[in-house]
Amino acid sequence: MLDLSRLRALHAVSVHGSVSAAAVALGYTPSAVSQSITKLERETRTTLLERRGRGVALTDAAVRLADTAQELLAMVERAETALEEQRGVPAGRLVIGAFASAARGLLPGVLAALAREHAALDARLVEVDPHLSVGLVAQGVLDLTVTFEWDIAPLPAPEGLGRARIGDDLCDVLVPRGHPLAGRERLSHADLAHQRWICQPPDTVCHDWLVRTLRAGGSEPDLAYQAAENHTQLALVAAGLGIALLPRLGRGPIPDGVLAVPLEPVPVRRLFTYWRTGAARRPAISETVRLLREQWPARSL
């Protein structure tokens, strides 16, 4: 009889593309995932992973088995949902995904409340790119995710997923204290032309939004410094190297030598949480959604 935990490991490798990425998503070590796959190969008498360059790839047999694993995991989820619903209290394992600033600025309080109020619930957090998180919920890798959309880049609404709006995360322009824009009460898009920018790397939602917004205002942005971490961007602004546009959630204290200047119209990213509709009756899902929305006002200042 096939072991469900080993099938879960294979499914995670198929979704994430590598043993190490699957380990991060599952909360295991890479060695534990590799051992699970090896044991599954012995059980099935089938080669499931093969070397390809520096990584591994699923064999054709493994792809078919991973598809079956997804179906089995969905069946197990339905059974667990029914039992949890019958008990009426959050219980079992809940894997929550969140983008970096939400994981830092919103989830600690939510996770602490879940741990304090629901001892039977094993809530876990995975930091994940907002581009990927909705798909990972649909595939069953995450139970629930916190992600966002900009006005120019609305999120998809895949079939089989439910969602709730958490709140609006406002953005400010961060400038060095001695910068010509530092003395302004508010800025317009025209004021941002011909500035040296500190921003997210390419192929990220925030980078794409900034470029498209500035181009729509008639200027080609000078993206002089690119850094993934908000704290790094703040440090570069403090050093007088340029300006940045940063959301407030998870930004942390603004360092000395940096001023936040409002931009009008105010850039807003809308935060949502997604879950599978088949698991919507889980008390763990409804309670987490409630806490996300309840704690948002205090975290969005």
Image: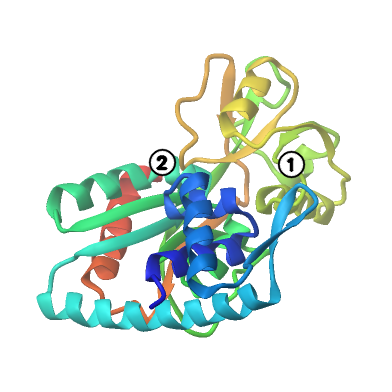
Query: To which residue does mark 2 refer?
Result: 105
Q: Position of residue 169 (x, y in %)?
A: 49, 50
Q: Position of residue 95 (x, y in %)?
A: 38, 59
Relative horizontal placement of residue 242, taking residue 122 as reference (left or right): right
Which secondary structure, mark 2? helix
Q: Quadrant of residue 57?
A: bottom right
Query: To which residue does mark 1 refer?
Result: 201
Report the residue at 64% width, 29% height from top. 233
Relative horizontal placement of residue 99, taking residue 58 as reference (left or right): left
Can residue 195 be seen at all in this image of the molecule? yes
The numbered dot on residue 167 is none
The residue closer to the viewer here, 255 or 3, is 3
Q: Amino acid at mark 2?
A: Gly
Above or below, 212 relative to 187: below
Q: Amino acid at mark 1?
A: Pro
Relative horizontal placement of residue 73, taking residue 149 as reference (left or right): left
The residue closer to the viewer here, 9 or 111, is 9
Q: How many marks?
A: 2
Sequence order check, earlier mark of 1 and 2: 2
Mark 2 surroundings within 10 Å by alpha-carbon count, few (fewer than 14), some (14 through 19), many (20 or more) = some
Q: Position of residue 238 (x, y in %)?
A: 63, 18
Report the residue at 50% width, 48% height from top. 24
The residue closer to the viewer here, 279 or 179, is 279
Relative horizontal placement of residue 248, taking residue 196 as reference (left or right): left
Can residue 301 be seen at all in this image of the molecule? no
Q: Position of residue 117 (x, y in %)?
A: 13, 52
Above or below, 288 relative to 182: below
